[in-house]
Image (cartoon, rainbow, N blue to C red):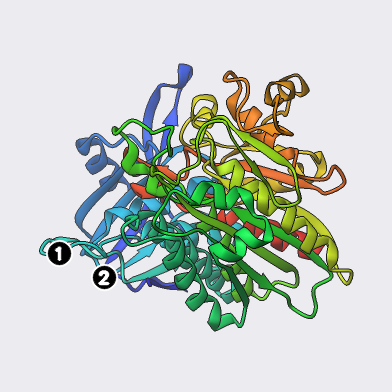
């Protein structure tokens, strides 16, 4: 893990500063301006050099200039010049610079900020950008450049050691989520997922319960069994509980954990199926979030639930038109075996609410499920913005305020009552698919059927943002992104305080 520190006097030979663009009428860039955290440099000479290099100051632009004050100067784009850059602008600029510095041991980040929030954003971005995944490389492993070994933040807010500690914890667990997502399904199965998380949970003395396939069948978890019965790798339900004595409130996080999704007997096309190793991104996010919350010692009870299964094709796989019984007794007609995530989530939404309401010592604040649930999410919101659906507007607003602080993009979506009728089944209580148009909303309506109206609930559809198949940007690499973890932690922090 990359080490991080703060200093009022830079000690590294590699200095990262910002570059902003000055816009005139019509948004035309008229000049660029280097900006830093009071780092001394020859601005006129630098502007001339930047002009010769064609620098624009655009976000995600990173330029390296050797020999300035006998140092390597790294210039990272901040976009339009401002007297007070947003925390996400600083976070992304630091992340882009950190990504470009792979192979270098130490760098000082001297980006402009006026408070501890900006300081925290720079620290988070630099650490989040210092990531690589080379676990499965063989002969080419030595050719890969390692991430930054040490990061120094040039700041006058460095006495706040808790900020750096929190940034390290968030980055470490975001990297864990990315690692789990990037691990091939030949190595990450429901069983191996459970074992890896259990070994990490031991260091915080978290209570870990793993329910086997035979136990799941006996206890009536028909969704998890129905999805996982077609695979040679049996399904599991992972439950992690963090219960500090000082906690007066509790929440439950539920993450979809399809370790690989072929679509089952509704087989997906071959093109793009390799990305389906990311279909457990929600499970990875909630498990890593509870580890971070425990390490931060937040005074709130958290129960993290990860229903885990492989959705495979075999003679045992669930067939279109099969009827399964979800935990709690509601029956579902499975019209499409590729709409499997909602089935395993339904089981656990019911069970997690049971456990949450059973704790009479603490106020149960509600359920949050995180899932790469629908391709319709990508159609509606693209690959960088996740969806939020809810039965409780106050809960949603609190979550969205947390997302604004972390820089993770979430957008509220409705649950239109007129679409609910499309889920009616002639043979069961509900069907697992309905109206194709508005498919993301229909999936949310399906899940809502398994949540009591009095239980606050959020559904996060992260299908597109969970896995970056294109180009790296800001602190986001290609592959698993780790989206939702930082906002879940922020939600726990905010809830514990209020």
Q: Determine if residue 19 is in view.
A: no
Distance (Cα) linking label 2 and label 1:
23 Å
Say few, some or many: other residues with alpha carbon within 10 Å of mark 2 (under 14 / 14 to 19 / 20 or more). Answer: some
Residue 138 marker: 1
Find numbered disc 2 in the image and state the secondary structure of the residue it sits on: loop
Above/below status of 393 relative to 352: above
* Percent position of residue 38, x then y: 45, 59
Which quadrant would residue 20 be assigned to in this image?
top left
For the view shown, which residue lies furthest in the front direction?
315
* Percent position of residue 356, x then y: 79, 62
Above/below status of 9 relative to 27: below
Which quadrant would residue 60 be assigned to in this image?
top left
Say few, some or many: other residues with alpha carbon within 10 Å of mark 1 (under 14 / 14 to 19 / 20 or more). Answer: few
Find numbered disc 1 in the image and state the secondary structure of the residue it sits on: loop
Taking the image as shown, residue 416 lies to the left or right of residue 437, namely right
* Percent position of residue 189, x then y: 41, 60
Taking the image as shown, residue 46 lies to the left or right of residue 399, namely left
Residue 105 marker: 2
Pick the front one: 465 or 201? 201
First of labels 2, 1 by sequence position: 2
């Amino acid at each position: 893990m990359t080490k991080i520190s703060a200093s009022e006097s830079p000690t590294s030979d590699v200095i990262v500063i910002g570059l902003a663009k000055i816009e005139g009428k019509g948004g035309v860039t008229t000049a660029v301006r280097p900006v830093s955290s009071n780092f001394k440099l020859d601005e006129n000479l630098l502007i001339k050099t930047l002009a010769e290099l064609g620098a624009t100051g655009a976000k995600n632009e990173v330029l390296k200039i050797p020999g300035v004050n006998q140092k390597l100067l790294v210039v990272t784009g901040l976009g339009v010049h401002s007297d007070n850059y947003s925390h996400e602008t600083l976070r992304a600029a630091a992340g882009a610079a950190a990504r470009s510095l792979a192979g270098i041991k130490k760098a000082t980040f001297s980006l402009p900020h006026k408070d501890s929030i900006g300081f925290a954003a720079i620290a988070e971005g630099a650490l989040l950008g210092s990531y690589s995944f080379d676990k499965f490389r063989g002969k080419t492993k030595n050719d890969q450049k390692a991430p930054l070994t040490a990061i120094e933040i040039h700041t006058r807010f460095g006495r706040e050691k808790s900020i750096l500690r929190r940034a390290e914890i968030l980055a470490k667990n975001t990297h864990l989520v990315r690692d789990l997502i990037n691990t091939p399904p030949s190595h990450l199965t429901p069983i191996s997922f459970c074992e890896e998380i259990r070994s990490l949970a031991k260091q915080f003395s978290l209570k870990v319960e793993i329910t086997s396939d035979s136990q799941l069948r006996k206890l009536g978890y028909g969704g998890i069994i129905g999805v996982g019965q077609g695979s040679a790798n049996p399904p599991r339900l992972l439950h992690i509980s963090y219960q500090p004595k000082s906690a007066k409130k509790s929440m439950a996080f539920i993450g979809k954990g399809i370790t690989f999704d072929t679509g089952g007997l509704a087989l997906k096309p071959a093109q793009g199926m390799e990305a389906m190793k990311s279909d457990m991104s929600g499970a990875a996010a909630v498990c890593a979030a509870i580890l971070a919350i425990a390490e931060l010692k937040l005074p709130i009870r958290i129960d993290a639930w990860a229903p885990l299964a492989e959705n495979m094709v075999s003679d045992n796989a669930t067939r279109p038109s099969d009827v399964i019984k979800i935990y709690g007794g509601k029956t579902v007609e499975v019209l499409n075996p590729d709409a499997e995530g909602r089935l395993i989530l339904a089981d656990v939404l019911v069970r997690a609410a049971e456990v949450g309401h059973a704790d009479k010592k603490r106020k149960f604040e509600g359920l949050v499920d995180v899932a790469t649930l629908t391709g319709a999410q990508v159609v509606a919101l693209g690959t960088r913005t996740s969806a939020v659906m809810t039965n409780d507007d106050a809960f949603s607003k609190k979550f969205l305020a947390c997302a604004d602080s972390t820089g993770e993009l979430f957008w509220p979506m409705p649950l239109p009552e007129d679409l609910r009728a499309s889920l009616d089944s002639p043979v069961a209580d509900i069907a697992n698919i309905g109206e194709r148009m508005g498919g993301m909303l229909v999936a949310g309506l399906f899940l809502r059927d398994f949540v009591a109206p009095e239980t606050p609930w959020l559904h996060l559809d992260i299908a597109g943002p969970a896995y970056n198949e294109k180009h790296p940007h800001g602190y986001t690499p290609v592959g698993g992104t780790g989206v939702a973890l930082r906002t879940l932690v922020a939600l726990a922090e905010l809830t514990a305080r209020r």
